[in-house]
């Protein structure tokens, strides 16, 4: 019971940190945040069924929700950025080919 709550809490914190780092870490952060959220929910339900209150389960739930939202935002933002950069690289390559053809340079 306690292990699930602590694990969910820690995964939520690590997912938030990974989200802010960005890049590949934002890809890792999303599943980590979801697992942390699920573990916090399961652990909280187990505490509730046993008639005990646990603030760590509530904190893990809140941090898990925040981690899922942030990692989703950063994940899609990073994906959009990658698509934009790839498009600009393609445009640059086309410009170089046009320039090379204009000056009859074999490129």
Image (cartoon, rainbow, N blue to C red):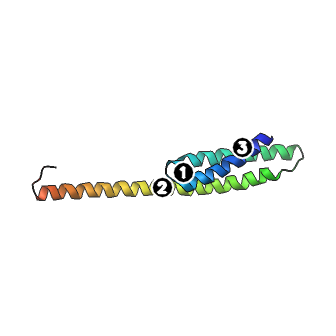
Residue 32 falls in image quadrant = top right
Q: Earlier in the sequence, mark 3 or mark 1?
A: 3
Q: Earlier in the sequence, mark 1 or mark 2?
A: 1
Residue 63 falls in image quadrant = bottom right
Q: Is label 1 in contact with label 2 (beta carbons under 8 Å)?
A: yes
Q: Is disc 3 placed on a helix, strand or loop?
A: helix
Crowding around mark 1 (Cα neighbors within 10 Å: few <14, some 14 to 19, many 20+) is: many
Q: Which residue is mark 1?
A: 26
Left or right of residue 25: residue 4: right
| Res 7 label | 3
In x, y percent, where is residue 88? 33, 58
In x, y percent, where is residue 64? 68, 52
In x, y percent, where is residue 70? 60, 57
| Res 78 label | 2
Q: Tell me what residue is drawn at x 40 percent, y 54 percent.
A: 83
Q: Is label 3 in contact with label 1 (beta carbons under 8 Å)?
A: no
Looking at the rendering, in which quadrant would you find the N terminus? top right
Q: Tell me what residue is drawn at x 72 percent, y 43 percent.
A: 7
């Amino acid at each position: 019971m306690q292990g699930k709550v602590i694990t969910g809490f820690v995964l939520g914190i690590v997912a938030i940190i990974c989200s802010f780092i960005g890049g590949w870490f934002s890809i890792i952060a999303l599943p980590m945040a979801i697992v942390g959220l699920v573990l916090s929910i399961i652990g909280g339900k187990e505490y509730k069924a046993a008639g005990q209150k646990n603030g760590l389960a509530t904190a893990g739930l809140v941090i898990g929700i925040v981690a899922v939202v942030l990692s989703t935002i950063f994940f899609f933002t990073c994906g959009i950025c990658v698509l934009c950069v790839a498009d600009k690289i393609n445009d640059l390559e086309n410009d170089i080919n046009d320039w090379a053809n204009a000056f009859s340079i074999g490129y």
